[in-house]
Structures are given as C-alpha cells and as structure tokens.
Amino acid sequence: MTHVHLATAAEAAEADGAAEAPGEPRVPGAAGTRAPGLERWTTEWCTRPESFALLAPEWRRLHRACPAATPFQSHAWLDSWWRSYGSGRGPRVLLVRRAGQLVAAAPLMRAPGPVPALVFLGGPISDFGDVLIDAAHAAPAARALAAALHRAARTAVLDLRELRPGAAAESLLAHWTGPLARRADSVCLELPALPMDEQLARLPRSTAQRVRAKLRKTDALGVESRAVPAEEVPAAVRTLLGLHRLQWQGRRVTPEHLRPRFRDHLVRAARAMVRSGEAAVTEYRLDGRVVAADLTLLSPSLAGGYLYGADPGLRSRKADVTSMLLRTCARYAAGEGRTTLSLLRGTEPYKEHWRPERVVNSRLLLARRRTAPLLWLRTAQAGARARAAHWARARAARAAKDGTPGRTAAPGAPAGRPGG
C-alpha cells in the first residue's frame, strides 16, 4: 500500500499557526481518535499536496459511491486545481475511514484573507462545491465528518460555497451544534437528462421546429463531431482555448479563461478525467479543420457543458453552435443513469430558450461559539461583495443598453461557455 502522510489534528493546527488549546477535550471522531461506539472509524487530515495526489484510486471509488458528487469533487479536478492555484501552505483535506476504507472526505484549504476560514478546494472556476460521503455508510460517516469539522471550527469558520440542493454537506447539519448561517449563492439552470429529441419535445412546437431546422442545416454543411481520446486531449484542449479566445475577441470574457494557469489546469484535469470517464472532449470538424471544441464534465448524477470554443466563421455559415453543442451534451447526459443536464452557473438568455429549471446553490457557514464573531464578520463581507457585484452587473447592463463598452467579467463569471 502506498504511504500517505496524514496529519493529526494537532499537526494541522500547528501548520496553520493555531496551536491546540490546553485542556480542550477531544471531540469524538476527531483526527487521531476513535469515536465511542465507532471503534473502527477514524478521521485524519491530509495536509500535503503530494499526499493528496496519492489518494487518487480510493478518492475515485468514494466519488462514485456518493450520489450527490459533481465533477468538481473528482480527484483529477481538485488535484490539478491545486497545482495551478494552490498556495504554499498546503491543503486541509479531511478523511473519514471505516476499517481503513475511505468513506467520507472534505476537500478544504485555508482561505486567504484576514478572517480565518476553511473553504473548498476548486475556487471560483468550480461551479459546485461539496463534501463526499459514501451512501453505504451515510449516517455514521456524516456524524464522524461533522465531529472532526466541529473540532476544526475552533480556530476557523467553515465557509462551504456553491452547494447544490441535496448536496452531501447538508447531512452535516443534523450533527452540528454551533452557530451556522445559510445564504443563497449562484443561480444555475438545469435540464432533465434526456436525448435531444426528448429535449425538443419539451419545447413549444414552433421553437422545436426551428431548432430541428438549424440542426439539419449544420449537418448539411458537413460538420462532423468526434470524441477525443485521452492521449489527444492536451492538444485538443489547447485548440479549444484558442478558439475560445478567438470567439470572444473584442467582447466581454472571463479573464481567467485566458491565463496560462487556467490552461495548464484544464489540460491536466481534462486528460485525467477523460481517461477515467469523468469528462469528454468533443471536436467538431468542417472540411478537415477543427472549427469548434467543447469540454463536458461528468459525474454519476449529472453532465455539464463547462467550456467551449468556436470559430466565428461558423455563424457566418449559418451553423447554430449552441444547438450543436447541446445535442452532444444531451447525449452524454442521457447515458449511464444520469438525471441532470446542468447548464451550470449563469442565466444567459440563450439558456432560457431551453426551458430549464432555475436552481439556486447554497452557501453554508459553520462555526463554534468561540468563532461565532468570525462567522458574522465573514457573512457581512459576503453580503457587501454580493451588493457590489449586483451594482457592477446593473452598471454593465446599463452600459450595454446605451451602447457603451462594459467592464470585463470577473474571474469565475460564466461568460463564454454553454454551461455556465
């Protein structure tokens, strides 16, 4: 068995500059202890990036065993994200084991800024955050995970963002005894996981007829699609990003999508995720040339179109790129028992044409009594940022209406991808 360094609670606290308080009773289920009545259960902290990398095989098993898991909790996504975006302090990944088997995990890190907080790995470029809990051990695993997180909350607020309705993290609430706050987070749009013909059957007849006509026109042009094999993914993702840059040239685009660290992350993550069946990269060719490419992320319950790029010349030839991409994403979503085709974050008008359901993510802040002031401070900061973002969006909308240039979208904003 590969050795993985697992820090005790004291080591993790020391690494964060927060030594254990003398005389503090150990919380059942916390790192380095075994909870009464749960003698075969342990919780540990993984605090080194190289150790987290070695967890890949058992993390993948846990990801498949958690019904609420999204692609953004996959090991490939999180490990690659850390390599591009992680700070020098290391992750804080909480692991719960039963008889040595990984049955729950919380992929966390220390948040930057003056308010001590633990947040999810993945950052703004991840549309969903969550913990992982094996459905076969749901109740006791959630209890052990909550107990260890309660101990961690002695020195930092837990700020759990972008939780989908039904997220595994919601099961922690039944075992939480300290202060907590819940706030609305991003709005996502979702469709049922149906093939394209059934998606069209949900639309008004006239709308469905127009979409079918557009797809026939695209097919008549000779646009051909193919799933890219894992060994070709790095080149395909670089092509995707080049088309993405070209497509949004001179318009508002998420700046992060143009940066080398994002490129490196997406190349690494997509290659590993395609190999493990957690993603699909699709290329679209016309006259032997790649004219569009997109990345669809996959989990046991959903498929989501994450990012695409398309040659502007496609539109001049009357190819409907949105319908073409959605047809492919719908095909992936309808397979392997998935229930949701997620358009991810954002409520752009072109998404509304498909009659999606509006789903609001949650932000959950958890603390203990001694860290309650930190919770209220972080909640107040979040409210101020939300008001500032609302003001910025309103200003951009007014600028667009007046025909004046708007500001570039903030990092993590959904401009430029069909799924958010």
Image: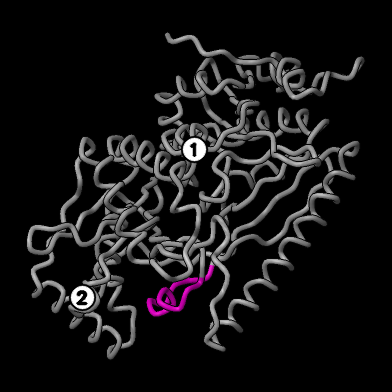
Who is closer to the viewer here, 83 or 64?
83
Give the amino acid at mark 2: Ala
Give the amino acid at mark 1: Trp
Q: Say whether residue 244 is left or right of residue 182.
A: left
Please determine whether, in this image, residue 215 is positioned above or below residue 280.
below
Q: Are marks 2 and 1 in contact (CB under 8 Å)?
A: no
Is residue 212 covered in magenta? no
Q: Find residue 211 and report its image quarter.
A: bottom left
Q: Position of residue 273 (x, y in %)?
A: 34, 39
Q: Secondary structure at mark 2?
A: loop
> Can you identify the residue that label 2 sits on?
319
Residue in the image at 78% along x and 62% along y: 384
Please determine whether, in this image, residue 379 is positioned above or below residue 137.
below
Residue in the image at 75% along x and 56% along y: 382
The answer to whether one can see residue 280 in this image is no
Q: Say whether residue 232 is left or right of residue 372.
A: left
> Can you identify the residue that label 1 sits on?
81
Q: Find residue 209 and report its image quarter.
A: bottom left
For the residues labelled 2 and 1, the Cα–Cα distance comes to 34 Å
Give the magenta range.
347-358
* Label disc, if present, on residue 38 of the rendered structure: none
Judge the density around disc 2: few (<14), some (14-19), many (≥20) Cα neighbours within 10 Å: many
Q: Position of residue 290 (x, y in %)?
A: 18, 57
Could you tell me which quadrant the N terminus lies in? top left
Residue in the image at 38% along x and 61% along y: 341
Is residue 348 covered in magenta? yes
Residue in the image at 33% along x and 66% along y: 247
Of the image marks 2 and 1, the number of the one nearer the N terminus? 1
Who is closer to the viewer here, 249 or 189?
249
Q: Secondary structure at mark 1?
A: helix
Q: Say whether residue 204 is left or right of residue 14.
A: left
Q: Find residue 9 and report its image quarter.
A: top right
